[in-house]
Amino acid sequence: MTAIEQTQARPRGTRLPRRARREQLLGAAQEVFVAQGYHSAAMDDIAERAGVSKPVLYQHFPGKLELYLALLDQHCESLLQSVRGALASTTDNKQRVEATMDAYFAYVEDEGGAFRLVFESDLTNEPAVRERVDKVALQCAEAISEVIAEDTGLSRDQSMLLAVGLGGVSQVVARYWLASRSEVPRETAVQLLTSLAWRGIAGFPLHGAEGTGGPQQG
Amino acid sequence: MTAIEQTQARPRGTRLPRRARREQLLGAAQEVFVAQGYHSAAMDDIAERAGVSKPVLYQHFPGKLELYLALLDQHCESLLQSVRGALASTTDNKQRVEATMDAYFAYVEDEGGAFRLVFESDLTNEPAVRERVDKVALQCAEAISEVIAEDTGLSRDQSMLLAVGLGGVSQVVARYWLASRSEVPRETAVQLLTSLAWRGIAGFPLHGAEGTGGPQQG
DNA sequence: CTGCACGCCGATCTTGACCTCCACGGCTTG
DNA sequence: CAAGCCGTGGAGGTCAAGATCGGCGTGCAG
């Protein structure tokens, strides 16, 4: 009845080198933060999850907030890399859209549900957290907006609006798709969104004017 | 130095009928919750903001959570009504898209920033809150998806995915537009998103097949 | 074998926020 | 004019959770 699933199953007595211990603590913290959110997560829970006592936690991190920020930074960077990688993976703009959408889906589907720290944080009132979350969203949108501006000739402000929209739609739908256990397979969902978005973007002037790859398949 | 801005400027001693007092408390609570989030908001702050003492607060609401839920319910209902009203305001599907987008922008721009309670709550771990937030998003998406399904002939699952996407894009971009103080006027932003979304939707089969209003103006 | 250093643990402190108890003052009634 | 009632106010209880202090066991150098 009181059995608690723990990924590591440490018998609470193992001695680890500092670096390894730190990584393990980060893993445990991620599990707890993802499952319970920042506020409901207790340092006791994290320590217990890691199979250590609380003082050890405080020997590796100054406090709860810093622990959370370490994880947040890690996964913000991860998202940004994925999006940039998707945009750089091809020069065909339609495939760019598809790759970017898929990047969001892959990110959301990633192990441990770490995306919740970025997209569903319950600590957005903390300026440090707000800054991270806003910044990564802005950086992703800027990366997307550059492509949009080149493809459509829209102004910076307007392409940013669209870029924010594309990032937003990817993130929101990916989360919905994951939560609803939709029977629609991931690839189909991505295709659907890509069709929607690409047709929308292609309707603006200048689309495909500069060798962006032909829209041969309607 | 210790001057605190209070919208009502009650001299802290006024006697109000219960209904009016309740409304005033709700208003004060909304201001504090919006400004500070659920966790950082203290019942003391809300009472002080309203110009009453704490026991009065507890005579009208059983606790902090119920107070929050009362506000949340109110604004969830408001959003749902706006979206449904927008969808029912016309039979032209393109104008439906535009009206719905505009409904989100209006909602976000609404006084007091109450949209934060719905879209940026820091209490999503609380099941009651999660239920409300998820439910209103789902209800909005369902309302939208009905139109999409009729217009495109897509399956229920697929039109729901698109509907969630449209709701998501509206919500995300509207919040970005509000936060970034974009020089793009609201009407232009709505037009931009409407173009994007409508072209995307219109690309699916069956679009405009059943008297949905002619797409005469590109 | 013995002393030392290091990392870990049980038990504790303190803060902060939600939530109630006893005294005061204005309004109504005879 | 006087008495009572009801709502208001300040001060306090309780508890959860973040953050910390002395003791213990283990591995290594001499």
Image: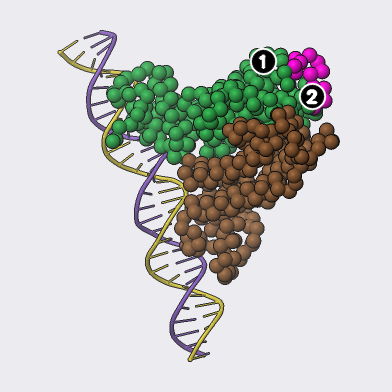
Chain colours: A green, B brown, C yellow, D purple
Report if residue B81 lies within the magenta region.
Answer: no
Question: Is any atom of residue B178 visible in this view?
Answer: no
> Looking at the image, is mark 2 or mark 1 nearer the viewer?
2
Q: Chain of mark 2?
A: A
Nearest to the observer: residue C15 or residue B178? B178
Q: Residue at x 62, y 29 (%)?
A: A170
Q: Is residue B53 left or right of residue A87?
A: left
Nearest to the observer: residue A79 or residue B158? B158
Question: What whole-number distance in Å separates the C-alpha atoms at marks 2 and 1?
Answer: 18 Å
Q: Which residue is mark 2?
A: A152
Nearest to the observer: residue A209 or residue B157? B157
Q: Position of residue D2 (x, y in %)?
A: 47, 88
Q: Which residues are magenta?
A: A204-216
In this view, A163 is above or below B25: above
Q: Position of residue B175 (x, y in %)?
A: 67, 39
Q: Position of residue B57 (x, y in %)?
A: 50, 60
